[in-house]
Amino acid sequence: MRGDATAVAFQFAGLALAPLVPGMIQMVKARLQGRRGASPLQPYRDLRRLWRKRVVAPHDTTFVYRMAPSLSAAALACALLIVPFAGSTNGWFGSDMLVLVGLLALARFATAAAAWDPGGGFSLMGAGRDLMFSVFAEPLLLLAFVLVALGAGSTDLVQMVAAAGHAHVASTPAHWCAALAFGLVVLVETGRQPIDNPDTHLELTMVHEGPLLEYAGRDLAMLQWTAAARHWLVLVLAASLFVPLPLTAPANVLALAAVVTAFCVAVAFVETSLAKMRILRVPVLLGIGIAVCVIGLASWIGGGAT
Amino acid sequence: MTTPTWVLVAGVAVAAAGIALSAAPRGLRAGLVLQALGVALIGIAGGLVLIDGAGVGSQFGNGLGPTVGVDALSGFFLVGVALVSTPALLYARGYLPGSHHAPAIAATSGVFVLALVGVVVARDAVTFLMTWELMSLAPAVAILLTSRTAETCRSVLVYLGSTHLAGVGVWLSMLTLAHLGAFTDPHALAAQPALVRSLLAGAALVGFGTKAGLMPLHTWLPRAHPAAPGHVSAVMSGMMIKVALYGLVRMLFEWLAPLPGWVAPVLLGAAALSCVGGVLYALMQHELKRLLAFHSVENVGIIGLGLAAALLLADAGQRQLAALAFAAAMLHTLNHALFKSLLFLCASSFQRQVGKLDLDRLGGLLRTMPLTGTAFLVGAMAIAGVPPFNGFASEWLTLQALVQLALHVGGGGTVMGALAAAALAATAALAVFCFVKVVGLVLLGAHRQKAVASSREVPASMTGPVIFLAGLCLAIGVVPGGVLALMRHLSPYGPLPAHTLRITLAVPGSGVFAPLAVAAFVAGCTAALQLARRRAGATAPSPMWICGQVPDSRLAWTSAGFTKSLRLVLEVVLRPQRSVSVERQGVIVHSSVHESHVPHLFDTLLFRPALGAVLAANRVLRRMQSGSLRAYLAYLLVTLAAVLTVVRLGVR
């Protein structure tokens, strides 16, 4: 099923709703920590404030620096328009999972390259660490995808989402291993603790926030939206791929909203209860994820592929 | 004679005239243009055959007389040779004048390109081997004409040594195949014992794999490529290693059938090692051309993954998917030829304007050399495999092929496919890491030395070719389906399913990928956001935030600094070495020197011990060569006695 009008509407709504996800996580986190915290709408207020400001840029920067925020936002917008809703997607960009990996890489390339333009040490430290994580996170993401694709028999996201609803797929150990691995991917891509601390104000410990350090005004607004879109992308994917949701339009969206909210609470809970890891320990954690995926593969073969 | 034949003959004639003209002292530029024109004609001939699918000239024969011919596969590689060599030869027009032995280098590069053409159109073992050796020797001549420092001579020695190693495998496999008549009779090999077929396949893998730069046989590649003159290194990295792959493809998909079962998994393993190892060592390099050379190892690995997937899928009876995997490998072959020659040509332009290509001593070249810089940026994004450039299109197809291998070939296929796909994903992430580093250190930021600050854009004869190549990288990235449609006669497994060949790519069992729509959306969205950004008012300049310190160029980040986190994580594998020496008088430190490098473990752990063993054996054997006449007479006598004894005993 492609080109469904409701799916298209929800995909575009996702572009607007994405900042709600980090807002919700921040609110739940504040409550868990005994603070009142800001409203979940706070990211929108931040975006409005930033959008009104002039752009400030360091001396002697090139178009690589100036274009990076727009390019990453565009790549993530494209990715969001690929993720299926209610069992269908618009057919404009296709519906393949591997394209998502490429678009995330494009956004990463743009922001990390831009960190070199002002050449500040803090930005580069963050960019280098982010890229180092990606070296382990990308195979992890791919293996998780492959495990799901094995069950679905296709790398088409629409079919992969549909397969999550089938009991014979959702009940395989391979699927659970994939879910576990995808949980780690969620933490890496969203830059949440224990991988990274989104609330840090200490430049030395920044990972995802590091390359954003020099940006201001509308540039920063685009980058903050990009980060929010990345939250939306991975959480919606996690909900669609690993939770059997109804595939008809209104029920799907309500269930999806509930599951994503639950995931936000879970992320906030993880972030409250775990301290940030040493950066050099993160690859070990991701490596464990890869090992889990390999176990999933073995279980798939052992279980006799359907 | 048919049209392609005429065009091909005309092209070779024009190119040969160009070689002769360029060797004359005053005809350098005109000669190079003629050479480029001739190669372009050859490429057109190849393209005609590729699109038409019907071959011209002879078929492969077992005889020893010289025969030539072009079929679809040869046509494809002719197009590749032309797409890389024409810009490279035109580039040489601006690059060569003024350098030592310019006419000789120009003539050598023409001979080199014609040798590549010769290997591809050869239709008998002798012509193939002759042009193969010529192809190997020509770059060595070009390197030695450029520079004769001790280091270059050593690189050439290693290169020639590896070429010999490759030659053994190639000669053995080609001549044996001719002897067995396997070029004409596809069933000739099936009658041979398994051991013979395994030995043949092993010889072919080592021979062509060495020349292609597959790990662990790649050690010559990062030495030879940086030493060659700019346009020759572009053709070497762009096409010479691809011509080796051409040989490998002929062997694996035509001549060696039925393949022994171990070949495809071994190729897959070596290819995965090449991908990850190549890019990992590239990341640790500090010299631009050496870094690019390691990336060739990586990309040959990616192509190898596609080829191995094709073999495995075909074995399992999935011919349509095998055709897809094969197409992925061929598309990546073309793509890598384009972006790698683009990057090498740009690097040579930088070298011309700045001097050395030490990554930590460049910086900010995008501002002083905007055209070359932008083309380099396009090449970097293409090789890093980010959409919408051509590298992503073929890596996407290769990943699809591997995932389909996991999906459709149960058991071992699932494990191999999934793990190889994960290795390719890690490779892609590492390539992004590496080219973010390269783009940052070369193009962006502050100038790190005076020569960079005073550098200027190179003349149009050197920017034109790289802009052309950059345009091709974007075009193929946006409409890969169109290019695949032109390549439809290439696959040994029959044509690709029709719906893969449209503007959107759709592999059976995958989602659709619409590269044109993705590119248009991302470009449009970026443009709109840029406009919105401008409407906020003029950009206010500000200093960079470094906690209130005064910016100091000596604090600028280096290549080693940027990759430090990964180097620490992979310390066990990479074994980096560092040394710190501090010179002090009393308590006052006068100077401190910090040195660190990542040794190339294949050299230190594999090749050096192997070389040591060979040399030790040689020392033992040298005792036999005493130079004394009596000893030699004794050897003769003993040999004669042995032969007579053997004959007497009747051993045959």
Image (cartoon, rainbow, N blue to C red):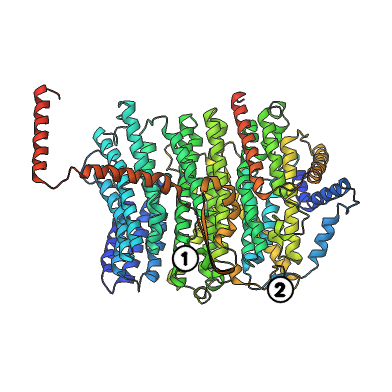
Please, which chain is the residue tagged with disc 2 on?
A: B
**Amino acid at pointer 1:** Leu
The crowd level at tag 1 (other Cα within 10 Å; few <14, some 14-19, many 20+) is some
Q: Is A282 on the left or on the right of A86, as rendered? A: left
- At which x and y percent is residue A142? 62, 41
In this view, the residue in front, A279 or B114, is A279
| Residue B409 % position (x, y) | 53, 30
- Return the mark for residue B357: 1
Separation of marks 2 and 1 at Cα, in angstroms: 31 Å
- The picture places residue B126, in percent across and down from the top left corner, at 24, 45
10 Å crowding of disc 2: few (<14), some (14-19), many (20+): few
Q: Position of residue B298 (x, y in %)?
A: 48, 49
Query: Looking at the image, is B352 positioned above or below residue B314?
Result: below
Identify whether B552 is placed above or below B293.
Answer: below
Residue, x 8% and y 28% (percent of image)?
B644
Q: Residue furthest front?
A: B586
Residue B552 in sight from this viewpoint: yes
Residues tagged by mark 2 and mark 1 found on one chain of the structure? yes
Determine which quarter of the picture holds residue B355.
bottom left
Q: Residue at x 31, y 62 (%)?
A: B144
Say what secondary structure mark 1 lies in. Answer: loop
Q: Which residue is mark 2?
A: B542
Secondary element at image label 2: strand
Residue at (21, 45) in percent of width and height: B622
Hey, which residue is sitting farthest bottom in the picture?
A: B454
N-terminal-most mark, 2 or 1: 1
Identify the amino acid type marked 2. Ser
Q: Nearer the viewer, residue A17 or A5?
A: A17
Question: Can you say whether B288 is above or below B59 in the image?
Answer: below
State which chain disc 1 sits on.
Answer: B
